[in-house]
Image (cartoon, rainbow, N blue to C red):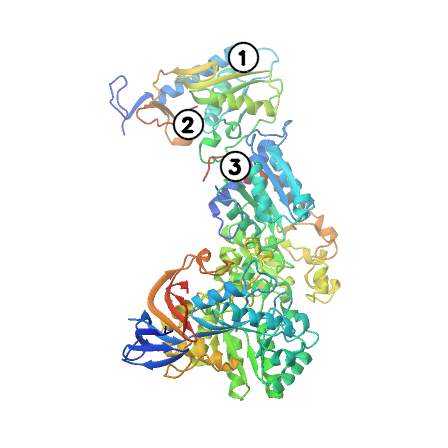
Amino acid sequence: MSPRPRGATEPAGERELLSAGDVARTIARMAHQVIEKTALGAGTTAPPVLLGIPTRGTPLAARLADRISEFSGVRPPTGALDVTLYRDDLRRRPTRALEQTQLPVSGIDDRVVILVDDVLFSGRTIRAALDALRDHGRPKSVQLAVLVDRGHRELPIRADYVGKNVPTSRAEEVAVRLSEVDGVDAVVLRSDVITPGTETS
Amino acid sequence: MSDQVLIKGARLYGEGDPVDVLVADGVITRIGEGDVAEDAVVLEAAGKVLLPGFVDLHTHLREPGREDTETIASGSAAAALGGYTAVFAMANTDPVADNSVVVDHVWRRGREVGLVDVHPVGAVTVGLKGEKLAELGTMAKSAAGVRIFSDDGACVADPLLMRRALEYSTALDVVIAQHAEEPRLTIGAQAHEGARSARLGYPGWPASAEESIVARDCLLAEYAKARLHVCHVSTAGTADILRWAKARGTRVSAEVTPHHLLLTDERLSTYDPVNKVNPPLRTEADTEVLRQALAEGVIDCVATDHAPHAPQDKDCEWTAARPGMLGLQTALSIVTETMVRTGLLDWRGVARIMSERPAEIAGLPDHGRPLIEGEPANLALVDPDAEWTVRGRELASIAANTPYEGMRLPGVVSATLLRGRITSRKGKIE
Amino acid sequence: MKHLLATDGLDPAFATAVLDTADELKHTLLGREVRKLPTLRGRTVVTLFYENSTRTRVSFEIAGKWMSADVINVSASSSSVNKGESLRDTALTLSAAGADCVIVRHPASGAAQRLSGWLAETGTVVINAGDGTHEHPTQALLDAATLRERLGSIEGRRVAIVGDVLHSRVARSNIHLLAALGAEVVLVAPPTLLPAGVEGLPVTVSHELDAELPALDAIMMLRVQAERMTGGFFPSAREYSISYGLSEARQKLLPEHAVVLHPGPMLRGMEIASAVADSPASAITEQVRNGVHVRMAVLYHLLAGEGES
């Protein structure tokens, strides 16, 4: 389906919010923000560790690390942190397959850890990630980078780095597509897809 | 006041035109049209088959000792409802029927209940231990008049002891009935030794454990010129051995249970010990051969091996369960399903295997008689086309361990008469 | 609810999912300080063992506890069982007391299936930890996990199971699972230790161990119990060992990559030479290690999600 022009009114279906080019620019901007906020490259502080939350947080974290490396000359260690085992809604759904957890060799103790995810919604995934992180070690601090913040927080959680703020209604869904997973880069808004009990992130 | 019973419009052995049969004073007085007393009980028999009352050579009435599962009274009721007019109650009671006191009790109690002729079977060895001969002579000459002796439940495994039992029996003109199971080959056995038990990890009960004893006993019986009866034949191999032995003139007879005609070790996949029985359910191929052998007369008759068990002995893991199934009330239906519906036997053949041959083997003068005027009225009236659903709780036995739970079966016993008196009618005891 | 009672008829997709989860669990726990996951918090798991077994019971207990479940152990010597309480009553009592899951080991084949029938109305999940000589599904799963790890794949591999197959639930469970996952299974044993009706199983049979060795990717040695000698299954320990023992000399006939497995406990010098058990080809300690992760994965797949899956 060809992307419709942005801003056009839609009754139902998909609307593209970010094109492939937009996604790339957004990630680049976030990379600069990370470099600035963490004072990357200055002094002897170790670079932050980027942990992607699977599925799409993982390639996002890798891309972010690439851009950071490109702009600052320092490559942050990256990894993946699956939160399935820590979710608070397991009993409400059929059993989920686990995703990969892979921490960098340098570990997370006394490091600034930046959790990376595609969409921030209720905040429960991030809360699960904080619980998971705690069992792996003791970071110096934890920050959060998301490509899209769509509002509707159910917990007191906020992102440090936001690619794009997208106000949504509960009935809508924001879908991030990344070529590593979906074959294409895009962020789309989908209407009439949310049914009660569908996953919130 | 007469005791006349008019059976109206039945077909004798399922053959010929329907006729009226008048019964009075314990005998068939008339076959055909004629006067009937006003107070005669009329049994509407249109579409039904009249057969001689069935004789079960192998049943467990559990009294004395396990009256929580069955008594002579409840077992007699089950028998009458199943079309039986005589049953042989096996000796593995508690105390064992290895003396005249126990057999006399069973005999007298059976007569007291009066629903079926209960003939106690005497043990071959004291306590069924297989070591010492029991007092066969005393039991034969007692009021109970024991005609069949068996250690059933256990095998008379010692060849010397079996030889002596057979020899001794010739003076008494009685039959030694063997539960053929070489105990050294069935230690810990749970199910037929084959692909299914291999898969499920159940220690096996090989067919050769039965066949080796049958072959041995046929040779011993021939040598002693004694009468041998083989209980619950379960393997195709045993049928072959019987054919061979009979061809040589050995005086051997054999019985098969209804469940061995229908059920197989495929039932193991239910893990439900209601299907656990000794000898075990075997393969489809075995059931085919057994049906054929029964039709040919290589196996002489059907015997139920009716074995009531308490719930706690079946509602457990397989290895802890006791073997055995109810059979008295479902026998006719299983025979209808496996032998009549398949075209292997007609109803005259059913009369032979359920009534005439067993009566002959047991030497009963009044049962399994031809359906002609003057003969004792021990009769079973069968509806060949009716069907019923088996529910363990609804059967007359105190126990409810039937493997046919919930199954819809053909062939219903409409009425049973014992010496001219109606004992069961339309599924109820009279 | 779903149970794990047998590998015979087990959906290969489910088995693979369990192995994948076990893998992930292993990685996620590696190098961690806190070897605990909150996933089964609030779930009550009872191990009901009618046969003594330290290794399997401890493995299940650790698995449950690492998933934050409450694990309670009931052994046959405990009072109510000794007072003659039936298996059915014991199971219903445990379920009524709050067990979400009963892990049962029992000497009667089919016991786990019976248990699942009696507990059908209660929603309690049953895991078979070994029933008679019938099945031991978690053992087969951990064996498969170990093979997958060492060989990279199971499909198309040739695995021999050597020894007392007749009395072995480990053998039966492995036969069905390996066949379902696409391996070729060959049983090697004297005729007396093979079940009659073995031709009904998805295996080939051989009585000559030496002839089979060069083509194997893995060899699983079964323990041979002393009682089998008195039962006439084979004349002597010496003859058994000579014909069917995995000696150092025999190990040389195996391909380089071949993996040696044993469900334990081993009779060193009888079915397996000490040096072979300790050689790099032996994956015996990995089996035990994988046992915990596999059992955690089984608990996860049966207890973490909603109802039927």
In this orientation, which residue lies closer to the viewer: B250 or A101?
Answer: B250
Question: Is residue C146 at all visible to an observer of this figure?
Answer: no
- At mark 2, the secondary structure is loop
Label 1 CA crowd tier, 10 Å (few <14, some 14–19, many 20+)? some
Picture quadrant of residue C91: top right
Q: Do marks 1 and 3 both belong to one polypeptide chain? A: no
Please name the residue that numbered disc 3 is placed on. C303
Does residue A78 lie above or below B165 as drawn?
Answer: above
Residue B217: image tag? none
C111 or B415: nearer the viewer? B415
Asked which quadrant contains residue A154, the reply is top left
Where residue A161 appears, as percent x and y from the top left, is 46, 14
Q: Which residue is labeled 2 in the image?
A: A199
Q: Residue at x 58, y 57 (%)?
A: B321
Q: Amino acid at mark 2?
A: Glu
> Secondary structure under badge 1?
loop
> Amino acid under label 1?
Thr
Disc with the residue nearer the chain's start (1 vs 2): 1
Chain letter for the residue marked with disc 1 in the picture: A
Nearer the viewer's eye, disc 1 or disc 2? 2
